[in-house]
Amino acid sequence: MTAPVARSPIHPLQTALYNRLTGDTQLMGMVTGGVHDEVPEKAAYPYVRIGEHISTPDNHHGGYGREVLSTLHVWTRARGNAQGQRIADRIVGLLDHQPAALTVGGHRVVAIRHEYDQALTDPTPGIRHHVLRFRIITDQVEE
């Protein structure tokens, strides 16, 4: 019998995040520009970008796990932070403490915790940016 090999959850996790966000009609009604990994040049505002991640092993006796810090970005062309905050709040509601909400091929999501939401004023006038970070713990499963 061959020993299992550790597999990264990053790509299937990004796919699961995309599916969770785009599958919510309320969120999609709020982000007319959609949800993207790579944002099209002419994307309409507001939109969400699935951004950066940091992945570290979280192995345990007899298995492989990962702790992933996943960053999501909300971009708006709004006066003030209210629109971006409403979108950020909806995303937090869809993900925080909702491990069963993400189907990640080859991995089981053990926990999802919202770590922070930062509202920023972009140097470009009229653009607002919210940065959300989630800590996602996964266990690799044999398929």
Image (cartoon, rainbow, N blue to C red):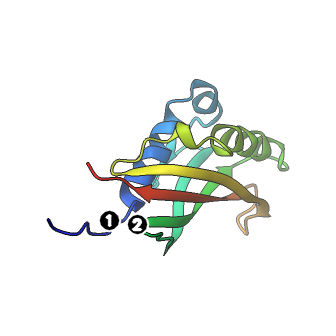
Q: 89 above or below 134? A: above
Q: 10 above or below 81? A: below
Q: Quadrant of residue 9?
A: bottom left
Q: Which residue is mark 1?
A: 7
* Amino acid type for the residue under numbered disc 2: Tyr
> Contact (CB < 8 A) between labels 1 and 2?
yes
At horizontal 45% and vertical 57% (from top left) the residue drawn is 139
Visible residue check, residue 128? no
At horizontal 77% and vertical 39% (from top left) the residue drawn is 86
Work out whether residue 134 or residue 129 is closer to the camera in this orientation and state it. Answer: 134
Residue 131 coordinates in the image, percent (x, y): 69, 60
Work out whether residue 75 or residue 14 is closer to the camera in this orientation and state it. Answer: 14
At horizontal 64% and vertical 26% (from top left) the residue drawn is 26
At horizontal 85% and vertical 50% (from top left) the residue drawn is 80
Residue lying furthest top: 25
* Amino acid type for the residue under numbered disc 1: Arg
C-alpha distance separating marks 1 and 2: 8 Å
Q: Secondary structure at mark 1?
A: loop
Q: Which badge, 1 or 2, comes first in the chain's sequence?
A: 1
Residue 63 coordinates in the image, percent (x, y): 40, 65
Q: Which residue is mark 2?
A: 64
| Lateral position of residue 90 relative to residue 45, left or right | right
Mark 2 is surrounded, within 10 Å at the Cα level, by few (under 14), some (14 to 19) or many (20 or more) other residues, namely some
1 vs 2, front mark: 2
